[in-house]
Image (spheres, helix red, strand yellow):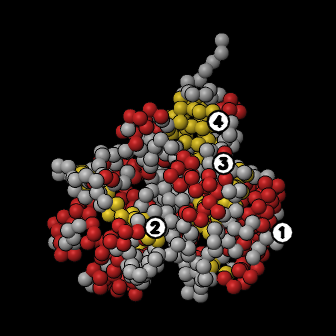
Amino acid sequence: RLCMSAAASAASQTFGMDRGLTNSLSEVPFTKCIILAGTNIAECQPTIMPYFEKAKQNGAYIIAVDPRETATTKMADLHLKVKPGMDAALANGLLKVIIEEDFTDEAFIRERANGYNEVKEYVTSLKLEEIAEMTGVPSDQIQKAAAMFGKEESGMIFTARGVEQQTDGSATVRNFLNILIVTGKIGKVNSGYGAITGQGNGQGAREHGQKADQLPGYRMIENEEHRLHIARIWGIDEADLPRKGVSAYEMIEKINEGEITGMFLMCSNPIVSNPNANFVKKALKKLKFLVAVDMFVSETARLADLILPTSSYLEDEGTMTNLEGRVTLREASFSLPGEVKHDWQIICDIAKALGKGEHFSFQSAKEIFEELRVASRGGTADYYGITYDRLRKEGGILWPCPSIDHKGTKRLFETSFAHQDGKAAMVVVNNVPLVPKEQPCTDFPLYLTTGRIMSHYLTGVQTRKSSSLSARNFESFMEIHPETAKKYHIPDNTLVKIESRRGSIVVRSKWSATIRHDTIFVPFHWADSQNVNHLVSQDLDPTCKMPGFKVSAVKVHPIVELTSN
Protein backbone atom coordinates (compact mmCIF):
# COMPACT_ATOMS: atom_id res chain seq x y z
CA ARG A 1 0.00 0.00 0.00
CA LEU A 2 2.94 2.34 0.49
CA CYS A 3 4.86 1.29 -2.62
CA MET A 4 3.14 -0.43 -5.53
CA SER A 5 -0.63 -0.06 -5.12
CA ALA A 6 -1.09 2.93 -7.47
CA ALA A 7 0.73 1.28 -10.37
CA ALA A 8 -0.91 -2.09 -9.71
CA SER A 9 -4.45 -0.69 -9.65
CA ALA A 10 -3.83 1.47 -12.72
CA ALA A 11 -2.47 -1.42 -14.80
CA SER A 12 -5.28 -3.72 -13.67
CA GLN A 13 -7.94 -1.17 -14.59
CA THR A 14 -6.34 -0.25 -17.92
CA PHE A 15 -4.98 -3.58 -19.15
CA GLY A 16 -6.99 -6.05 -17.07
CA MET A 17 -3.87 -7.33 -15.28
CA ASP A 18 -0.76 -6.04 -13.57
CA ARG A 19 2.81 -7.18 -14.04
CA GLY A 20 5.63 -4.78 -13.21
CA LEU A 21 6.96 -4.70 -16.78
CA THR A 22 4.86 -5.63 -19.77
CA ASN A 23 8.10 -6.53 -21.57
CA SER A 24 11.36 -8.04 -20.41
CA LEU A 25 14.25 -5.78 -19.41
CA SER A 26 16.22 -7.07 -22.39
CA GLU A 27 14.07 -4.92 -24.69
CA VAL A 28 14.85 -1.62 -22.92
CA PRO A 29 18.20 -1.01 -24.70
CA PHE A 30 16.52 -1.18 -28.09
CA THR A 31 13.56 1.17 -27.64
CA LYS A 32 13.70 4.55 -29.37
CA CYS A 33 12.11 6.82 -26.75
CA ILE A 34 11.74 6.48 -22.97
CA ILE A 35 9.64 8.50 -20.52
CA LEU A 36 10.81 8.20 -16.91
CA ALA A 37 7.97 9.61 -14.81
CA GLY A 38 8.86 10.15 -11.17
CA THR A 39 11.62 7.59 -11.09
CA ASN A 40 15.23 8.17 -10.03
CA ILE A 41 16.62 4.87 -11.27
CA ALA A 42 20.29 5.83 -10.93
CA GLU A 43 20.03 6.23 -7.16
CA CYS A 44 17.02 4.09 -6.21
CA GLN A 45 17.32 1.03 -8.50
CA PRO A 46 20.93 1.24 -9.78
CA THR A 47 21.12 -2.44 -10.71
CA ILE A 48 18.87 -1.86 -13.75
CA MET A 49 20.56 1.38 -14.78
CA PRO A 50 22.81 -0.35 -17.38
CA TYR A 51 19.73 -1.19 -19.49
CA PHE A 52 18.90 2.52 -19.77
CA GLU A 53 22.52 3.54 -20.32
CA LYS A 54 22.67 1.04 -23.17
CA ALA A 55 19.47 2.52 -24.63
CA LYS A 56 21.09 5.95 -24.47
CA GLN A 57 24.17 4.62 -26.25
CA ASN A 58 21.91 3.15 -28.92
CA GLY A 59 20.37 6.56 -29.58
CA ALA A 60 17.20 6.45 -27.48
CA TYR A 61 15.69 9.84 -26.60
CA ILE A 62 15.08 9.95 -22.84
CA ILE A 63 12.52 12.24 -21.17
CA ALA A 64 12.61 12.57 -17.37
CA VAL A 65 9.74 13.98 -15.27
CA ASP A 66 10.93 15.16 -11.83
CA PRO A 67 10.81 18.36 -9.74
CA ARG A 68 14.51 17.81 -8.95
CA GLU A 69 17.62 17.31 -10.97
CA THR A 70 18.99 13.86 -10.12
CA ALA A 71 21.59 11.46 -11.42
CA THR A 72 18.79 10.08 -13.60
CA THR A 73 17.66 13.41 -15.06
CA LYS A 74 21.28 14.18 -15.94
CA MET A 75 21.14 11.21 -18.31
CA ALA A 76 17.97 12.51 -19.96
CA ASP A 77 17.80 14.49 -23.19
CA LEU A 78 14.86 16.47 -21.83
CA HIS A 79 14.05 17.15 -18.16
CA LEU A 80 10.47 18.26 -17.44
CA LYS A 81 10.82 19.91 -14.02
CA VAL A 82 7.18 19.49 -13.03
CA LYS A 83 5.55 21.20 -10.07
CA PRO A 84 4.93 18.60 -7.31
CA GLY A 85 1.52 16.96 -7.67
CA MET A 86 0.86 18.08 -11.24
CA ASP A 87 1.94 14.94 -13.10
CA ALA A 88 -1.57 13.99 -14.26
CA ALA A 89 -2.05 17.44 -15.80
CA LEU A 90 1.34 17.13 -17.52
CA ALA A 91 0.24 13.81 -19.03
CA ASN A 92 -2.89 15.56 -20.32
CA GLY A 93 -0.67 18.14 -22.01
CA LEU A 94 1.33 15.39 -23.70
CA LEU A 95 -1.88 13.66 -24.78
CA LYS A 96 -3.28 16.90 -26.20
CA VAL A 97 -0.24 17.46 -28.41
CA ILE A 98 -0.05 13.80 -29.49
CA ILE A 99 -3.71 13.79 -30.54
CA GLU A 100 -3.82 17.23 -32.16
CA GLU A 101 -0.51 16.74 -33.99
CA ASP A 102 -1.68 13.35 -35.28
CA PHE A 103 0.95 11.19 -33.59
CA THR A 104 -1.76 8.61 -32.79
CA ASP A 105 -2.06 5.02 -34.02
CA GLU A 106 -5.66 5.11 -35.24
CA ALA A 107 -5.79 1.42 -36.20
CA PHE A 108 -4.53 0.32 -32.79
CA ILE A 109 -7.00 2.60 -31.00
CA ARG A 110 -9.92 1.38 -33.11
CA GLU A 111 -9.15 -2.31 -32.74
CA ARG A 112 -7.75 -2.50 -29.21
CA ALA A 113 -9.02 0.31 -26.98
CA ASN A 114 -12.20 1.67 -25.40
CA GLY A 115 -12.76 5.19 -24.13
CA TYR A 116 -10.61 7.07 -26.64
CA ASN A 117 -13.29 9.48 -27.84
CA GLU A 118 -13.99 10.67 -24.30
CA VAL A 119 -10.28 11.20 -23.60
CA LYS A 120 -9.84 13.04 -26.91
CA GLU A 121 -12.82 15.30 -26.23
CA TYR A 122 -11.47 16.24 -22.80
CA VAL A 123 -7.81 16.88 -23.63
CA THR A 124 -8.59 18.84 -26.81
CA SER A 125 -10.81 21.14 -24.72
CA LEU A 126 -7.81 22.08 -22.57
CA LYS A 127 -5.44 24.95 -23.30
CA LEU A 128 -1.77 24.06 -23.42
CA GLU A 129 -0.77 27.43 -21.94
CA GLU A 130 -2.93 26.73 -18.89
CA ILE A 131 -1.39 23.27 -18.47
CA ALA A 132 2.07 24.85 -18.72
CA GLU A 133 1.15 27.29 -15.96
CA MET A 134 -0.35 24.55 -13.77
CA THR A 135 2.61 22.21 -14.13
CA GLY A 136 5.45 24.70 -14.29
CA VAL A 137 6.67 23.02 -17.49
CA PRO A 138 6.97 25.40 -20.49
CA SER A 139 4.59 24.62 -23.35
CA ASP A 140 7.44 24.24 -25.84
CA GLN A 141 8.95 21.49 -23.67
CA ILE A 142 5.57 19.72 -23.47
CA GLN A 143 5.28 19.93 -27.26
CA LYS A 144 8.81 18.63 -27.78
CA ALA A 145 8.35 15.68 -25.39
CA ALA A 146 5.04 14.72 -27.00
CA ALA A 147 6.45 14.94 -30.52
CA MET A 148 9.56 12.92 -29.70
CA PHE A 149 7.58 10.13 -28.05
CA GLY A 150 4.75 10.22 -30.59
CA LYS A 151 6.79 10.06 -33.76
CA GLU A 152 9.19 7.26 -32.79
CA GLU A 153 8.42 3.74 -33.92
CA SER A 154 8.91 2.33 -30.42
CA GLY A 155 8.74 3.73 -26.91
CA MET A 156 8.42 2.81 -23.25
CA ILE A 157 7.03 4.60 -20.20
CA PHE A 158 8.27 3.86 -16.69
CA THR A 159 6.66 5.18 -13.52
CA ALA A 160 7.71 5.00 -9.88
CA ARG A 161 6.93 6.54 -6.51
CA GLY A 162 7.31 10.12 -7.71
CA VAL A 163 4.00 9.98 -9.58
CA GLU A 164 2.46 7.06 -7.69
CA GLN A 165 2.74 8.22 -4.07
CA GLN A 166 0.06 10.87 -4.48
CA THR A 167 -3.63 11.06 -3.68
CA ASP A 168 -4.30 10.73 -7.41
CA GLY A 169 -1.43 8.32 -8.06
CA SER A 170 -3.58 5.61 -9.62
CA ALA A 171 -5.27 8.08 -11.98
CA THR A 172 -1.92 9.64 -12.88
CA VAL A 173 -0.46 6.29 -13.92
CA ARG A 174 -3.61 5.60 -15.94
CA ASN A 175 -3.05 8.86 -17.80
CA PHE A 176 0.51 7.87 -18.72
CA LEU A 177 -0.91 4.54 -19.89
CA ASN A 178 -3.35 6.52 -22.04
CA ILE A 179 -0.28 7.91 -23.84
CA LEU A 180 0.96 4.38 -24.60
CA ILE A 181 -2.42 3.34 -25.95
CA VAL A 182 -3.03 6.32 -28.25
CA THR A 183 0.44 5.90 -29.75
CA GLY A 184 0.05 2.11 -30.03
CA LYS A 185 3.24 1.53 -28.05
CA ILE A 186 2.13 -1.46 -25.98
CA GLY A 187 2.19 -5.19 -26.71
CA LYS A 188 4.87 -4.67 -29.34
CA VAL A 189 8.60 -5.26 -29.63
CA ASN A 190 10.56 -2.67 -27.61
CA SER A 191 7.34 -0.88 -26.58
CA GLY A 192 5.51 -1.11 -23.28
CA TYR A 193 5.10 -0.04 -19.66
CA GLY A 194 7.16 -0.59 -16.54
CA ALA A 195 6.42 0.10 -12.86
CA ILE A 196 9.84 0.40 -11.25
CA THR A 197 9.71 -1.75 -8.12
CA GLY A 198 11.60 -0.57 -5.05
CA GLN A 199 12.01 -3.96 -3.37
CA GLY A 200 13.36 -7.29 -4.52
CA ASN A 201 10.09 -9.17 -4.17
CA GLY A 202 7.62 -6.30 -4.39
CA GLN A 203 6.10 -7.83 -7.52
CA GLY A 204 5.77 -11.34 -6.05
CA ALA A 205 4.18 -10.06 -2.85
CA ARG A 206 1.37 -8.25 -4.57
CA GLU A 207 0.59 -11.19 -6.85
CA HIS A 208 -0.13 -13.57 -4.04
CA GLY A 209 -2.36 -11.92 -1.51
CA GLN A 210 -0.41 -9.32 0.45
CA LYS A 211 -3.26 -6.85 0.07
CA ALA A 212 -6.46 -7.18 2.08
CA ASP A 213 -8.61 -7.60 -1.04
CA GLN A 214 -6.56 -10.34 -2.71
CA LEU A 215 -5.98 -14.08 -2.81
CA PRO A 216 -3.08 -15.99 -4.43
CA GLY A 217 -2.58 -15.63 -8.17
CA TYR A 218 -4.20 -12.18 -8.31
CA ARG A 219 -7.55 -13.67 -7.43
CA MET A 220 -9.85 -11.35 -5.51
CA ILE A 221 -11.27 -12.07 -2.08
CA GLU A 222 -14.74 -10.70 -2.93
CA ASN A 223 -15.08 -12.81 -6.08
CA GLU A 224 -17.23 -15.87 -5.25
CA GLU A 225 -15.62 -18.10 -7.88
CA HIS A 226 -12.15 -17.12 -6.66
CA ARG A 227 -13.11 -17.76 -3.04
CA LEU A 228 -14.37 -21.26 -3.85
CA HIS A 229 -11.21 -22.09 -5.81
CA ILE A 230 -8.87 -21.12 -2.96
CA ALA A 231 -11.09 -22.66 -0.27
CA ARG A 232 -10.95 -26.03 -2.05
CA ILE A 233 -7.16 -25.91 -2.25
CA TRP A 234 -6.79 -24.88 1.38
CA GLY A 235 -9.30 -27.51 2.52
CA ILE A 236 -11.60 -25.05 4.29
CA ASP A 237 -15.21 -23.89 4.03
CA GLU A 238 -15.53 -20.88 1.74
CA ALA A 239 -17.52 -19.11 4.47
CA ASP A 240 -14.44 -19.25 6.73
CA LEU A 241 -12.50 -16.97 4.37
CA PRO A 242 -12.68 -13.36 5.57
CA ARG A 243 -14.10 -10.60 3.44
CA LYS A 244 -12.18 -7.60 2.16
CA GLY A 245 -10.13 -5.83 4.82
CA VAL A 246 -8.79 -2.30 5.01
CA SER A 247 -5.53 -0.78 3.81
CA ALA A 248 -2.35 -0.17 5.79
CA TYR A 249 -3.04 3.35 7.07
CA GLU A 250 -6.72 2.61 7.63
CA MET A 251 -5.63 -0.18 9.98
CA ILE A 252 -3.85 2.45 12.08
CA GLU A 253 -7.06 4.49 12.22
CA LYS A 254 -8.99 1.44 13.40
CA ILE A 255 -6.38 0.81 16.10
CA ASN A 256 -6.85 4.39 17.28
CA GLU A 257 -10.63 3.86 17.36
CA GLY A 258 -10.25 0.66 19.41
CA GLU A 259 -11.63 -1.62 16.69
CA ILE A 260 -8.25 -3.37 16.29
CA THR A 261 -6.57 -4.28 19.60
CA GLY A 262 -3.82 -6.72 18.57
CA MET A 263 -1.26 -6.65 15.77
CA PHE A 264 1.17 -9.15 14.25
CA LEU A 265 3.84 -7.10 12.48
CA MET A 266 6.30 -8.84 10.17
CA CYS A 267 9.39 -6.92 9.02
CA SER A 268 7.58 -3.58 8.88
CA ASN A 269 8.25 -0.27 10.60
CA PRO A 270 5.03 1.78 10.33
CA ILE A 271 6.10 4.41 12.87
CA VAL A 272 8.63 5.58 10.29
CA SER A 273 7.07 4.47 6.98
CA ASN A 274 3.47 5.67 7.38
CA PRO A 275 2.19 9.21 6.86
CA ASN A 276 1.13 11.35 9.81
CA ALA A 277 3.75 9.47 11.84
CA ASN A 278 3.02 11.16 15.19
CA PHE A 279 -0.54 9.85 15.01
CA VAL A 280 0.69 6.36 14.03
CA LYS A 281 2.91 6.10 17.12
CA LYS A 282 0.13 7.26 19.44
CA ALA A 283 -2.29 4.74 17.90
CA LEU A 284 0.11 1.77 18.15
CA LYS A 285 0.62 2.50 21.85
CA LYS A 286 -3.11 1.78 22.33
CA LEU A 287 -2.75 -1.86 21.20
CA LYS A 288 -3.38 -4.46 23.87
CA PHE A 289 -0.75 -6.72 22.32
CA LEU A 290 1.87 -6.11 19.61
CA VAL A 291 4.11 -8.84 18.18
CA ALA A 292 7.03 -7.76 15.99
CA VAL A 293 8.86 -10.24 13.75
CA ASP A 294 12.16 -8.69 12.71
CA MET A 295 15.93 -9.00 12.52
CA PHE A 296 16.42 -5.74 14.40
CA VAL A 297 14.69 -3.78 17.12
CA SER A 298 13.15 -1.14 14.85
CA GLU A 299 11.45 2.02 16.06
CA THR A 300 8.12 0.18 15.95
CA ALA A 301 9.51 -3.00 17.53
CA ARG A 302 10.49 -0.91 20.58
CA LEU A 303 6.77 -0.76 21.37
CA ALA A 304 6.25 -4.51 20.99
CA ASP A 305 5.20 -6.80 23.82
CA LEU A 306 7.06 -9.63 22.08
CA ILE A 307 9.81 -9.66 19.42
CA LEU A 308 10.41 -12.84 17.40
CA PRO A 309 13.82 -13.00 15.65
CA THR A 310 13.59 -13.88 11.97
CA SER A 311 16.10 -15.04 9.38
CA SER A 312 18.15 -12.83 7.07
CA TYR A 313 18.48 -12.69 3.29
CA LEU A 314 21.39 -15.13 3.14
CA GLU A 315 19.67 -17.62 5.46
CA ASP A 316 16.43 -17.67 3.48
CA GLU A 317 15.42 -20.03 0.71
CA GLY A 318 12.55 -19.42 -1.65
CA THR A 319 11.37 -17.77 -4.83
CA MET A 320 11.43 -14.09 -5.67
CA THR A 321 9.63 -12.31 -8.48
CA ASN A 322 11.42 -9.28 -9.86
CA LEU A 323 9.96 -6.14 -11.43
CA GLU A 324 9.60 -7.72 -14.88
CA GLY A 325 7.62 -10.67 -13.48
CA ARG A 326 10.54 -13.09 -13.62
CA VAL A 327 10.37 -15.79 -10.95
CA THR A 328 13.79 -16.82 -9.63
CA LEU A 329 14.95 -19.27 -6.97
CA ARG A 330 17.30 -18.18 -4.23
CA GLU A 331 19.04 -20.93 -2.30
CA ALA A 332 20.07 -20.40 1.33
CA SER A 333 23.77 -19.66 1.90
CA PHE A 334 23.88 -20.05 5.69
CA SER A 335 22.07 -22.09 8.33
CA LEU A 336 19.90 -20.46 10.98
CA PRO A 337 21.69 -19.20 14.10
CA GLY A 338 20.45 -19.77 17.64
CA GLU A 339 16.69 -19.53 18.13
CA VAL A 340 16.10 -17.70 14.86
CA LYS A 341 13.35 -19.07 12.59
CA HIS A 342 12.21 -18.34 9.06
CA ASP A 343 9.11 -16.17 8.61
CA TRP A 344 7.14 -19.14 7.29
CA GLN A 345 8.14 -21.28 10.29
CA ILE A 346 6.97 -18.58 12.69
CA ILE A 347 3.60 -18.42 10.93
CA CYS A 348 3.25 -22.21 11.01
CA ASP A 349 4.10 -22.34 14.73
CA ILE A 350 1.55 -19.66 15.54
CA ALA A 351 -1.08 -21.48 13.47
CA LYS A 352 -0.35 -24.64 15.43
CA ALA A 353 -0.71 -22.79 18.74
CA LEU A 354 -4.06 -21.45 17.52
CA GLY A 355 -5.32 -24.95 16.73
CA LYS A 356 -5.00 -24.65 12.94
CA GLY A 357 -1.76 -26.56 12.48
CA GLU A 358 -3.27 -29.02 9.98
CA HIS A 359 -3.52 -26.17 7.45
CA PHE A 360 0.10 -25.10 8.04
CA SER A 361 1.95 -28.40 8.11
CA PHE A 362 4.71 -27.28 5.73
CA GLN A 363 8.22 -28.59 6.26
CA SER A 364 10.02 -26.43 3.69
CA ALA A 365 9.69 -23.32 1.53
CA LYS A 366 9.44 -25.64 -1.47
CA GLU A 367 6.26 -27.23 -0.09
CA ILE A 368 4.69 -23.78 0.25
CA PHE A 369 5.65 -22.95 -3.34
CA GLU A 370 4.06 -26.18 -4.56
CA GLU A 371 0.79 -25.12 -2.95
CA LEU A 372 1.16 -21.67 -4.50
CA ARG A 373 1.58 -23.22 -7.95
CA VAL A 374 -1.76 -24.99 -7.58
CA ALA A 375 -3.49 -22.02 -5.96
CA SER A 376 -2.44 -19.68 -8.77
CA ARG A 377 -3.34 -22.11 -11.56
CA GLY A 378 -5.76 -20.50 -14.00
CA GLY A 379 -5.41 -17.13 -12.30
CA THR A 380 -3.96 -13.95 -13.72
CA ALA A 381 -0.55 -14.59 -12.13
CA ASP A 382 -0.35 -18.26 -13.12
CA TYR A 383 2.73 -19.99 -11.68
CA TYR A 384 1.56 -23.53 -12.29
CA GLY A 385 4.22 -24.34 -14.92
CA ILE A 386 7.07 -23.08 -12.73
CA THR A 387 8.92 -25.60 -10.56
CA TYR A 388 12.08 -25.57 -8.46
CA ASP A 389 13.70 -27.94 -10.97
CA ARG A 390 12.92 -25.64 -13.89
CA LEU A 391 14.14 -22.58 -12.00
CA ARG A 392 17.43 -24.30 -11.18
CA LYS A 393 17.92 -25.24 -14.84
CA GLU A 394 16.59 -22.10 -16.53
CA GLY A 395 17.55 -19.43 -14.02
CA GLY A 396 14.24 -17.59 -14.15
CA ILE A 397 10.79 -17.78 -15.78
CA LEU A 398 8.38 -14.96 -16.58
CA TRP A 399 4.76 -15.50 -15.59
CA PRO A 400 2.11 -16.31 -16.69
CA CYS A 401 3.41 -19.82 -17.17
CA PRO A 402 0.36 -22.11 -17.23
CA SER A 403 2.03 -25.47 -17.97
CA ILE A 404 5.29 -27.33 -17.44
CA ASP A 405 6.16 -27.10 -21.16
CA HIS A 406 5.34 -23.36 -21.34
CA LYS A 407 8.41 -21.13 -21.74
CA GLY A 408 6.94 -18.21 -19.81
CA THR A 409 5.54 -14.96 -21.20
CA LYS A 410 8.19 -12.41 -22.14
CA ARG A 411 5.82 -9.83 -23.62
CA LEU A 412 2.23 -9.19 -22.54
CA PHE A 413 -0.72 -8.01 -24.64
CA GLU A 414 0.68 -8.86 -28.08
CA THR A 415 -2.74 -9.82 -29.43
CA SER A 416 -5.21 -8.75 -26.74
CA PHE A 417 -5.51 -7.22 -23.30
CA ALA A 418 -6.76 -9.09 -20.24
CA HIS A 419 -10.21 -7.53 -20.07
CA GLN A 420 -13.07 -9.76 -21.15
CA ASP A 421 -13.46 -7.94 -24.48
CA GLY A 422 -9.71 -8.01 -25.10
CA LYS A 423 -9.42 -4.22 -25.20
CA ALA A 424 -7.58 -1.70 -23.05
CA ALA A 425 -9.71 0.73 -21.05
CA MET A 426 -8.78 4.38 -21.45
CA VAL A 427 -10.19 6.89 -18.97
CA VAL A 428 -10.48 10.66 -18.68
CA VAL A 429 -8.17 11.97 -15.95
CA ASN A 430 -9.12 15.45 -14.82
CA ASN A 431 -6.47 18.10 -14.24
CA VAL A 432 -8.02 18.67 -10.82
CA PRO A 433 -7.83 15.53 -8.59
CA LEU A 434 -10.79 14.20 -6.60
CA VAL A 435 -8.84 14.49 -3.34
CA PRO A 436 -7.46 18.05 -3.14
CA LYS A 437 -3.71 18.27 -2.55
CA GLU A 438 -2.16 20.69 -0.13
CA GLN A 439 -1.10 23.90 -1.82
CA PRO A 440 1.46 26.41 -0.54
CA CYS A 441 -0.05 29.35 1.32
CA THR A 442 1.08 32.26 3.46
CA ASP A 443 1.65 30.06 6.52
CA PHE A 444 3.16 27.12 4.62
CA PRO A 445 4.69 28.61 1.45
CA LEU A 446 6.73 25.69 0.07
CA TYR A 447 6.10 22.29 -1.47
CA LEU A 448 7.73 19.33 0.28
CA THR A 449 8.49 16.19 -1.68
CA THR A 450 10.24 13.07 -0.37
CA GLY A 451 12.28 10.20 -1.76
CA ARG A 452 15.25 7.87 -1.49
CA ILE A 453 19.00 8.29 -1.65
CA MET A 454 21.61 5.80 -2.77
CA SER A 455 23.20 5.00 0.60
CA HIS A 456 20.04 4.07 2.51
CA TYR A 457 17.01 1.83 2.06
CA LEU A 458 13.39 2.22 3.17
CA THR A 459 13.13 3.16 6.87
CA GLY A 460 16.86 2.63 7.37
CA VAL A 461 16.50 -0.12 9.98
CA GLN A 462 19.27 -2.09 8.29
CA THR A 463 21.30 0.53 6.43
CA ARG A 464 21.57 3.01 9.31
CA LYS A 465 23.33 0.23 11.25
CA SER A 466 26.02 -0.01 8.58
CA SER A 467 29.01 2.18 9.49
CA SER A 468 30.10 2.53 5.85
CA LEU A 469 26.63 3.56 4.66
CA SER A 470 26.05 5.88 7.62
CA ALA A 471 29.38 7.54 6.90
CA ARG A 472 28.02 8.57 3.51
CA ASN A 473 24.79 10.01 4.98
CA PHE A 474 24.73 9.95 8.78
CA GLU A 475 21.84 12.40 9.10
CA SER A 476 18.89 13.60 7.09
CA PHE A 477 18.95 16.77 5.03
CA MET A 478 16.80 19.24 3.14
CA GLU A 479 17.55 20.18 -0.47
CA ILE A 480 16.59 23.81 -1.11
CA HIS A 481 17.34 26.24 -3.93
CA PRO A 482 19.93 28.87 -2.88
CA GLU A 483 17.64 31.77 -3.76
CA THR A 484 14.83 30.25 -1.70
CA ALA A 485 17.24 29.59 1.15
CA LYS A 486 18.36 33.23 1.17
CA LYS A 487 14.73 34.36 1.21
CA TYR A 488 14.16 32.41 4.43
CA HIS A 489 17.62 33.22 5.91
CA ILE A 490 18.88 29.66 5.73
CA PRO A 491 22.65 29.24 5.23
CA ASP A 492 24.01 26.14 3.56
CA ASN A 493 24.85 23.19 5.85
CA THR A 494 22.96 24.45 8.90
CA LEU A 495 20.23 22.97 11.06
CA VAL A 496 16.76 23.92 9.94
CA LYS A 497 13.27 23.28 11.25
CA ILE A 498 10.59 22.17 8.78
CA GLU A 499 6.95 22.41 9.84
CA SER A 500 3.65 21.29 8.33
CA ARG A 501 0.14 21.24 9.74
CA ARG A 502 0.93 17.86 11.34
CA GLY A 503 4.33 18.22 12.94
CA SER A 504 7.93 19.33 12.63
CA ILE A 505 11.40 17.88 12.09
CA VAL A 506 14.98 19.15 12.29
CA VAL A 507 17.41 18.39 9.46
CA ARG A 508 20.48 19.96 7.86
CA SER A 509 20.17 22.33 4.91
CA LYS A 510 21.77 21.47 1.59
CA TRP A 511 21.72 24.10 -1.13
CA SER A 512 20.88 22.78 -4.59
CA ALA A 513 20.62 25.02 -7.64
CA THR A 514 18.88 22.22 -9.54
CA ILE A 515 15.66 21.95 -7.51
CA ARG A 516 12.58 24.07 -8.16
CA HIS A 517 12.45 27.38 -6.28
CA ASP A 518 9.09 26.48 -4.71
CA THR A 519 10.08 22.96 -3.59
CA ILE A 520 12.21 21.31 -0.92
CA PHE A 521 13.24 17.65 -0.83
CA VAL A 522 13.85 15.47 2.25
CA PRO A 523 14.74 11.72 2.17
CA PHE A 524 12.58 9.34 4.22
CA HIS A 525 15.15 6.96 5.73
CA TRP A 526 15.46 8.55 9.17
CA ALA A 527 13.37 8.20 12.32
CA ASP A 528 12.39 10.18 15.41
CA SER A 529 13.08 13.93 15.10
CA GLN A 530 14.25 13.51 11.47
CA ASN A 531 11.30 11.42 10.26
CA VAL A 532 9.88 13.37 7.32
CA ASN A 533 6.61 11.42 7.56
CA HIS A 534 5.76 13.48 10.64
CA LEU A 535 4.96 16.17 8.07
CA VAL A 536 2.92 14.13 5.57
CA SER A 537 -0.89 14.16 5.45
CA GLN A 538 -3.04 11.10 6.10
CA ASP A 539 -5.06 11.72 2.90
CA LEU A 540 -5.27 8.61 0.70
CA ASP A 541 -5.83 7.86 -2.98
CA PRO A 542 -9.53 6.84 -3.15
CA THR A 543 -8.75 4.05 -5.63
CA CYS A 544 -5.73 2.31 -4.14
CA LYS A 545 -5.36 3.93 -0.67
CA MET A 546 -1.85 5.19 -1.38
CA PRO A 547 -0.85 8.09 0.89
CA GLY A 548 0.21 11.36 -0.72
CA PHE A 549 3.87 11.27 0.34
CA LYS A 550 5.09 13.44 -2.52
CA VAL A 551 3.07 16.63 -1.92
CA SER A 552 2.89 18.53 1.38
CA ALA A 553 2.84 22.25 2.22
CA VAL A 554 5.55 23.33 4.68
CA LYS A 555 7.47 26.26 6.09
CA VAL A 556 11.17 26.38 6.96
CA HIS A 557 13.39 28.45 9.22
CA PRO A 558 16.88 28.11 10.73
CA ILE A 559 17.22 26.81 14.26
CA VAL A 560 19.59 29.67 15.11
CA GLU A 561 18.97 33.02 13.48
CA LEU A 562 22.25 34.55 12.27
CA THR A 563 22.70 38.24 12.89
CA SER A 564 25.31 40.56 11.46
CA ASN A 565 27.25 43.06 13.59
Q: What is the CA distance from the residue labelled 1 to the residue labelled 2?
A: 38 Å
Between 146 and 390, the residue placed more toward the observer is: 390
Q: Is residue 110 above or below residue 493?
A: below
CA distance for labels 2 and 4? 38 Å
Given residues 114 and 422, the one toward you in this image is 422
User: Residue 326, labelled with which disc?
Assistant: 2
Name the amino acid, label 4: Ser
Residue drawn at x 23%, y 67% as measured from the top left: 364
Residue in view at x 53 percent, y 29 percent: 495
**Along the viewing direction, whichever of 151 and 302 lies nearer the viewer:** 151
Q: Earlier in the sequence, mark 2 or mark 4?
A: 2
- The numbered mark, 4 or 1, whose residue comes first in the sequence reads 1
Circle number at residue 75: 3
Quadrant holding the C terminus: top right
Q: CA distance from mark 3 to mark 1?
A: 27 Å
Q: Secondary structure at mark 4?
A: loop
Counting the numbered discs, the total is 4
Q: Amino acid at mark 2?
A: Arg
Residue at which label 1 appears: 101
Horizontally, residue 474 falls left or right of residue 27, namely left
Q: Residues within 10 Å of mark 3 (few under 14, many from 20)?
A: some
Residue 400, position in %: x, y? Answer: 46, 77
Crowd around label 1: few <14 · some 14–19 · many ≥20 (10 Å) = some
Q: Say which of marks 3 and 1 sits in front.
A: 3
